[in-house]
Structures are given as C-alpha cells and as structure tokens.
Image: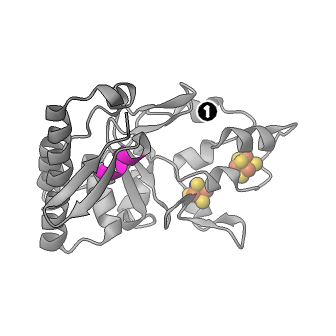
Amino acid sequence: MAENAREEAAAGQAACRRCGACCLSGGPALHAADLPLLDRGAIPREHLITVRRGELADNPVAGRVQATRVELVKIAGSGREWRCFYYDEEGKGCRIYGQRPLACEELKCWDTAAILALVEKDVLSRLDIVGADEPLRPLIVAHEDQCPVPDLQRLAARLREIDPAEREALQQLVARDLAFRDRVVRQLGLTLGLELFAFGRPIFQLLAPLGIRAAMTAAGPVLQWPEK
Ligand code: SF4
Ligand code: SF4
C-alpha cells in the first residue's frame, strides 16, 4: 500500500472503511494457504503475475524498494495500472471477496503487524502451482537458467560505471529473454496473462526504471543507456 494511503486510512481507525486504497495500490502476493483458491479455479493463472527473485519491489518491512529475496506470485494489475485486477472501482469492492487471498484477509491498514509478518514468508512460487507433468514446468526452469534476472540493485548503484562488455552481455540477455518468450508463446499458445505468470515481466521492462531503455530494431533489441 502507498504510504500516504496507509497513513490516511489508518488515522484514528479500528476497522476497515472499505476505502479501497490497499486494492488500488496493487494485488497481493499469494501464500501457501492460497493454493486451494488456485486449485478450484477461483483465481485463474491468467490473472497472476510473477515477480522473479531479484526484481526490485517495495519491501514494506525494510521500508524501501529492494531486490526480492524470493519469487513472488501476485494477483496482476488492471491493464497498465497496479490496481488489483479484482478491484471493482464502480462498486468499490473486491470481486472475489469471499475467496480473497490470505494477505487480503490479514491486511488491516490500522494495525500492520499481521500483514508485515507475511512479507516473503510461505509464499507460493510458480513451481508450487504448475504440476510436475505440465509442459510449462521445464520451460519455467529453463527460462530461469538461461534468462535470470540481472543484479538490478548493483546495476542501479553503478549505472555509469558499467563497461562495454557488461553492456553487451546485458543486451544479449534481453534478446535471449525475448526470443525465449516468443518461442514458447507460439509453442504453447500462451496469452499475455499466462506469459506474465510463466516468465514474469520481460527483462527490458525491469531495466526501464533504471533509465536503461530498449529500442526494438530489425536486428534485435538495442539498449540505450542514460547519458553520463
Ligand atoms: S484495509 Fe484497505 S480498504 Fe480497508 S480501510 Fe485500510 S486501506 Fe481502506
Ligand atoms: S483480491 Fe480483492 S481484497 Fe485483495 S487486493 Fe484484490 S481487490 Fe483487494
């Protein structure tokens, strides 16, 4: 939840006012207790997004953006917004309230102890969700092996010191990631939603907040680095 929203919602409060601020700031990470919701189809994979280990994300315990130490599978946002996919803005409520994930049940913006205790604890990963006999499973493993999330924290800290060889390696990683996705999307007929669950966001999108842009050319992606 955004700090302002949390403070605003929490002022003098002892119960949920159903203001929706928490749902507007993003979908929750899923925990082991949520597996039955997935198994019975209450939350389809299409509506999930994976945050791979090492991606930069707001850590409310640390109180800052940092690299995630574990993989997270979260409810996706709406379109290009972070607002939880299941938040009904007109009706001001959750469209799956009776089957909402554990983190939503535990979230009390006026008393954050329970929700903070859940951060990066007993979280679900893709391999907890995808069955042993599904063709997607070895592809997730292969993608992690061939296209790991780069050390984004180090990159952010040393952005202007990255040498040409490392820049080239990063560009190749971006290209490999895109080619891998393209191949698997065609092979399995994945929708964008399922691709984001299976492989998280493309690496070039993870670089954009650092100021590293990718220009898509006929020869492949070309990284554009911020001016020194
Ligand atoms: S828990 Fe969420 S919906 Fe309820 S008052 Fe707090 S921010 Fe608003
Ligand atoms: S699942 Fe429901 S309660 Fe949880 S963040 Fe989304 S809209 Fe809010």
- Report the colour scheme: one colour
| Residue 24 x, y percent position in the rendering | 63, 56
| Residue 160 x, y percent position in the rendering | 34, 29
Of 1 and 213, nearer the camera is 213
Quarter of the displayed picture in which ligand 2 can be seen: bottom right
Residue ranking furthest to the front: 228
Of 129 and 207, nearer the camera is 207
| Residue 219 x, y percent position in the rendering | 13, 62
Decide if residue 19 is on the left or right side of residue 154.
right
Which secondary structure lies at badge 1? helix
Could you tell me which quadrant the N terminus lies in? top right
* Magenta run includes residue 180: no
Residue ranking furthest to the right: 12
Task: Give residue 145's quadrant in the image.
Answer: top left
Of 30 and 79, nearer the camera is 79
- Residue 70 in the image: above or below residue 15: above
Is the CB of mark 1 within 8 Å of ligand 1?
no
Task: Give residue 137's quadrant in the image.
Answer: bottom left
Q: Is residue 157 visible?
A: yes
- Residue 147 in the image: above or below residue 40: above
Give the magenta-colored segment's residue range.
204-208
Could you tell me which quadrant the C terminus lies in? top left
Q: Amino acid at mark 1?
A: Ala
Residue beneath the point at 42% across and 64% down: 47
Q: Which residue is mark 1?
A: 114
- Residue 18 in the image: above or below residue 150: below
| Residue 195 x, y percent position in the rendering | 28, 63
Residue beneath the point at 34% across and 40% down: 71
- Residue 1 in the image: above or below residue 35: above
Binning the other alpha carbons within 10 Å of mark 1 as few (below 14), some (14 to 19) or many (20 upward) gives few
